[in-house]
Amino acid sequence: MSNVSSRQPFLNARLQGFGATIFAEMSALALRTKSVNLGQGFPDTDGPQEVKDAATHAIASGLGNQYPPGIGVPELRHAIRDHQKRFYGLSYDPDTEILVTAGASEALAAAVLALCETGDEVVTFEPWYDIYGANIAMAGATKRVVTLRPPDYSFNEAEFLNALSPKTRLILLNSPHNPTGKVFSKEELSFIAETAIDRDLLVVTDEVYEHLVFEGEHIPIASLPGMRERTVTISSGGKTFAFTGWKIGWVCARPELTAAVRIAKQFLTYVSGGPFQYAIAKGLSLGDDYYANLLADMREKRDFLTEGLESAGFQTFRSQGTYFVTADARSVGFEDGLELCLQLPEKVGVVAVPNVVFYDNEHEGRHLIRFTFCKSFDVLSDAVQRLGRLK
Ligand code: PMP
Ligand code: GLN
């Protein structure tokens, strides 16, 4: 089991080797074995009622039931503008610098497809989020990775510089980072930014966990000096409002970059999620208490699961953000995290994700596994009790 699959007779060469996503596979395993699913990162409770009501209201009153504007409904683009200003002091023009997409997933695909020529190289960090590799392959580009290593998942600057070549077109960044829970520091982001400026590279940054930062702060790389004009910032409402099924995402970038991404996006889905666009606009305008409560709740869950994992014998690596905490399989007697993830459901009835599938250099992640804590306390305490039986 992994993202890598055997040869598919009808699949083109660019996508050979890509199989079912690990998240779908592990969720299916959880269902089959009736295990507690701490694999795929989706909340088990819905987001705010008023946001749900806004979606219902939009459908009932005919808002967005027909094709919305290609760049997104004005209400949402204005809400995204206000959000970027409110949280980061960044100004974007809602008509030329903001684009609504089918989740961050489509924004990422459209950005990579729009900005890369065949043969270009994209530098990203490993472990990487699974769709990056497929997006880069679809664009006919090549992925070059820089490894983030525990305990703090920092990277080596020389390795980063070595990953760059004259063919490098863009740096694909993700902070807060899935699956490690790393939040890139100001120093790290500044180093990446200075390198991007020095080499005249674009940066595509995936910030879907921007409101889930427990330690340090989320710094959009676009806010660093000289970066706004070379950065495509991507986020979505899935994590922030706990409606991962709605798939409302967005891009913020200077007009020329937004125009390029819009052209690719237009021929992927054209538009999507009309009524949900109004609802996410409502979500983005919620008061500071909403964002503070979301964070406080998730921090408590992170602490609860981390302590539970540690008392079950796992060495964990501190999660600074996201929905995820990583652990070392060797601390419970497994050299191989994939093997542990395959045995965990049978042994104790818990599903986790083996991080090896997010690495090009598999030896770097062979022993690492990921648990999500975006579940109710009942589910988390059930999981912790079950994991206690590992000893
Ligand atoms: N980027 C990262 C790092 C993710 O974890 C996810 C999945 N939740 C996405 C992008 C995709 O986001 P969306 O569901 O908005 O497409
Ligand atoms: N982003 C989620 C995770 O990392 C999964 C989303 C998906 O299944 N594609 O678990």
Image: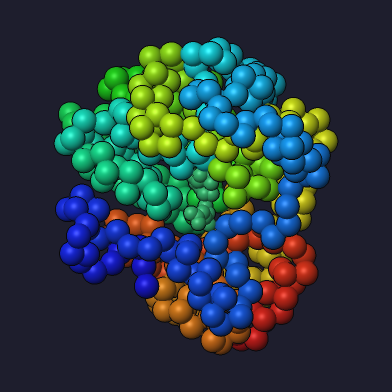
Left or right: 267 as drawn, with respect to 187: left
Give the left or right position of residue 61, taking residue 314 as reference: right
- Note whether residue 152 is visible: no
Q: Residue at x 42, y 20 (%)?
A: 258
User: How many marks are shown on the rendered structure?
Assistant: 0
| Residue at 48% in and 62% down | 23
The image quadrant of residue 267 is: top left
Residue 81, horizontal then vertical, whole percent: 62, 19
Q: Measuring 64% from the left and 71% from the top, which residue is drawn there?
A: 309
Looking at the image, residue 376 lies above or below residue 138 = below
- Compared to residue 63, the image places residue 8 above or below, namely below
Residue 330, horizontal then vertical, whole percent: 47, 75
What residue sits 33% from the left and 34% below the top?
A: 112
The way the protein has been coloured in the rendering is: rainbow
Q: Nearer the viewer, residue 367 or 66?
A: 66
Residue 377 in view, yes or no: yes
Along the viewing direction, whichever of 352 and 76 lies nearer the viewer: 76
Q: Residue 313: x and y, percent?
A: 60, 77
Where is residue 201 drawn, in percent x and y?
31, 24
On screen, 303 above or below 97?
below
Quadrant that contains the N terminus: bottom left
- Front one among 77 and 275: 275
- Pick whichever, 142 or 286, lies toward us: 286
Q: Which quadrant would the C terminus be assigned to in this image? A: bottom right
